[in-house]
Amino acid sequence: MQVTVGKLAETIDGKVIGNSQELIDRPSKIEEATRGSISFVAQEKYIPYINSTTASAYIVSNKLDLSAYPDKTFIIVDDVYASIATLLEAYSPRSEGTGISENAAVDPSATIGENVSIGPFTVIEKGATVGDNVIIEGQCFLGAYANVGSGTTIHSGSRIYTKCEIGNDCIIHSNTVIGSDGFGFAKLEDGSYKKIPQVGIVRIEDRVEIGAGCTLDRATMGETLIMEGAKLDNLIHVAHNVSIGKNTVIAAQVGIAGSTKIGNNCMIGGQAGIVGHLEIADGTIFQAKSGMTKSVKKTGTKWYGYPAIEYNNYLRSFAVFKNLPQLNTKLNQLEKKVKNLDGNSQA
Amino acid sequence: MQVTVGKLAETIDGKVIGNSQELIDRPSKIEEATRGSISFVAQEKYIPYINSTTASAYIVSNKLDLSAYPDKTFIIVDDVYASIATLLEAYSPRSEGTGISENAAVDPSATIGENVSIGPFTVIEKGATVGDNVIIEGQCFLGAYANVGSGTTIHSGSRIYTKCEIGNDCIIHSNTVIGSDGFGFAKLEDGSYKKIPQVGIVRIEDRVEIGAGCTLDRATMGETLIMEGAKLDNLIHVAHNVSIGKNTVIAAQVGIAGSTKIGNNCMIGGQAGIVGHLEIADGTIFQAKSGMTKSVKKTGTKWYGYPAIEYNNYLRSFAVFKNLPQLNTKLNQLEKKVKNLDGNSQA
Amino acid sequence: MQVTVGKLAETIDGKVIGNSQELIDRPSKIEEATRGSISFVAQEKYIPYINSTTASAYIVSNKLDLSAYPDKTFIIVDDVYASIATLLEAYSPRSEGTGISENAAVDPSATIGENVSIGPFTVIEKGATVGDNVIIEGQCFLGAYANVGSGTTIHSGSRIYTKCEIGNDCIIHSNTVIGSDGFGFAKLEDGSYKKIPQVGIVRIEDRVEIGAGCTLDRATMGETLIMEGAKLDNLIHVAHNVSIGKNTVIAAQVGIAGSTKIGNNCMIGGQAGIVGHLEIADGTIFQAKSGMTKSVKKTGTKWYGYPAIEYNNYLRSFAVFKNLPQLNTKLNQLEKKVKNLDGNSQA
């Protein structure tokens, strides 16, 4: 692409300050911005880079004071992140479908929509349904009677097991497994375990994105559910019968144990773990690596620690924890002093 | 399936209270139980659902008092979980074999048993052996001279590397890697690392189930060993030369470092980590997210924390941790008071 | 192999004490060493096994006093680990290439070097480049315009996405994903999220080894970078725009959040997590399971805990943590005592 700043500004509904005829051929992070690139300032700490770099234009918030940069070109927008998303989308369109590979193994009883792309060595089993405009890359597995909604992209090496349902406009990244058996066993008297067959499904609603290398287990009975707009990062484990609410965002390597219900608009930091059979209210935030062991009833609270307690309480306790050796010494000295005082007063 | 309660009761050796002619067409979780379904009560907290739902029958323990539900139909059993396992198994049989796909790449020198199913785009290398009644789904990799016992199921995308051995009646879930190289390097003087080739294997005994997305590394020399009946959940890492005992159960995202030996009948909670070169006694329990740094000699102990200490000790210490700010304040006030007393006594 | 001790000693530049004509047919761990095997002692705690086992020879450090073992055969070397690496390498060569499988789907526009092996059901997309002496096992995915340097091995089921670059002499283990989308979204006013397209790449320099089941996300813009000689274990998550320095070693299940820069020669223990936008100095060590939340400027420091603090400080604080119940009791008793004293002094 080579395009003027003015044209880009139109795409993102922004206002140009400076030279709208500057030519742009790539986006770049501001630390690496050089002539020909368009960059952006979305956080205050990156403001100093405006002076030290030579991007041909900077996308900035309408709150930034530009008077210090008379020689620079800017596009002013309301929401910098949303503008970048729009811009990159415009100039890096979804890959075109390439049709159904002759090397794919598609069962004749599967229903395939219009304008579908299925890559080489992908397996689609009997009775599966694939909506319009779906891209299934090479080497994927779509089990019997599974269902993929329209506009969805499934990346190479993902496995979607029998009867599971993926909504519209979802993205499933590479090597993710949806619908593997839940981890359920009945302990027998001799100490061995008998498998409890997992006969439920996983259902994923519309506009969900799931990262690479995740595992989402099918329900024992009923369904494991990811509601619309939820975003999951990589290597996340979702156990059987879990439910994750709308627009909830989950960072990498989180694990959620069986039957827990996560509300809408929650944010879960990386490597957090949530035990089974909990109910987590809407808008709950878990700090990275938290270990949550109880339900949350009030909306909008924030948690931290192992086991997790309220965020501010953890911070305060941890501040003392760091000084425990000194606290301990102080206590011992005080004890001695009191012993002396006691001796004196009894003398 | 549509079957009477009486017939189901026979399958699980239970006794019917109520109408044994009720027709059942599906199992369901008790929270979602409606007419036509059979449900179950395995934990006390689910008892109230008997009144609020309309399942056509409930499987319950012989310890439950049923006098409060004169209009409901029950099947009474000794062990609710084991009965569910039996019931679901009876009505959701293992998928039938479909023979060897013409799209599989099976080396002519491989030995394939009777009634084996091998899915499309699976690779079976030279000298590999596959026992009777094995199902290997599509897109799996079975390396040279690897060995899979009879009755085992290997799900799509799993990789079993050269010379590794899988026992009878095992289940390996999707995208799991067995026999990748252990993480072994010799540090050289210039700070770089020289790879130590990993020439051992992974050996998995009978009736082991391993979840999706796990990685079990081959031994440097000798073998990494998973003993019979062990059950591993998803995304678990097992390093080189680890050994895991019989009927040990490991929840998702656990990591076990090199050469550690875990005993029989242990239970390891999700996201726990166990450092290398330890010996863990039979029956040890690790709470989720624990970080274990030392060997356990006594059987049947329970651990918690980071680093892990005995479970009850961690609970007691953490109870004080939560009040550390108050404890700190109290100590400071006491210090002042003592200073005053000291001043007074010296006045 | 069956070879004399003398011959093996030449390979690793060692000196034989004892019978250089002993015949060796396998390496073994010292705990399992029997006649015919060569074993080694790399840590002090394994010294007692010299007496209790019957290996035909032991590789030992020149620091070990051998006078207690007059009947044993030894090969004395400077660096035991490096010698093992050399020895195993000599006797377990890299698997031979088998040429390009007729079942691979290689786009005609891809550039394939000399002596390349490409396994069955591997996909190589348009414009990709594969250097000389590369082994790409079966069922791998190499996206459009991706680039693999010479001498590199890519194991079964790995996915390398469009435009990513892998250096020379790298090893990528099974089911690892390189170049999946970074986790980037702009939050909209209605609480939903808009995807920020990830248009950067992953670049991996020479002699890097990456374990099984890892996910390395492509940069939003620019590159996610793994520098030469870095070694990553299994199930590791590397987020967009992260950079990992030369010869840095990272154990299994570590997660590194977006834009964090890790220095050279760092060591990161298993399951550690590092938050985004940090800079970590060369030679930093993180204890397993640490949760790092701030940048490290000084080289060669060691960290532990959640959140991580300096290693020794964490140890000291945790030592008091374990005794918090007793400390709390002591404080309460002291408080009573002071109350009494105060009462007395005011009486």
Image: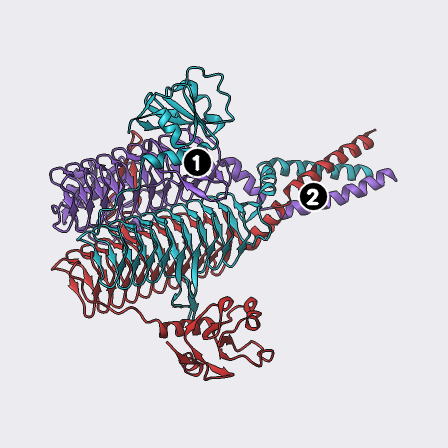
Chain colours: A purple, B cyan, C red
Q: Which residue is rendered at x = 31% and y = 65% of the image?
A: C206
Q: Which residue is rendered at x = 71% and y = 45% of the image?
A: A332
x and y, in percent, of residue A193 in the image:
44, 43
Name which quarter of the figure residue A224 lies in: top left
Name which quarter of the figure residue A229 lies in: top left
Name which quarter of the figure residue A206 lies in: top left
Query: Disc 2 and disc 1: Cα gap in Å?
Result: 55 Å
| Type of the residue with mark 1 | Ala
Residue in the foreground of this view, choosing between A231 and B87 = B87
Q: Is residue C176 left or right of residue B257?
A: left
Q: Quadrant of the C terminus of chain B?
A: top right
| Type of the residue with mark 2 | Leu
Please rate how many residues cluster around mark 1, counting C-alpha atoms within 10 Å: few if below 14, some from 14 to 19, many from 20: some
Helix, strand or loop for disc 1: helix
State whether residue C334 is above or below residue C226.
Answer: above
Residue in the foreground of this view, choosing between B279 and A80 = B279
Residue B82 disc label: 1
- Residue A61, visible in the rendered structure: no
x and y, in percent, of residue B65 in the image:
51, 21
x and y, in percent, of residue C170 in the image:
30, 64
Residue in the foreground of this view, choosing between B337 and A238 = A238
x and y, in percent, of residue C142 in the image:
22, 56
Residue on which disc 2 sits = A331
State whether residue C332 is above or below residue C90.
Answer: above
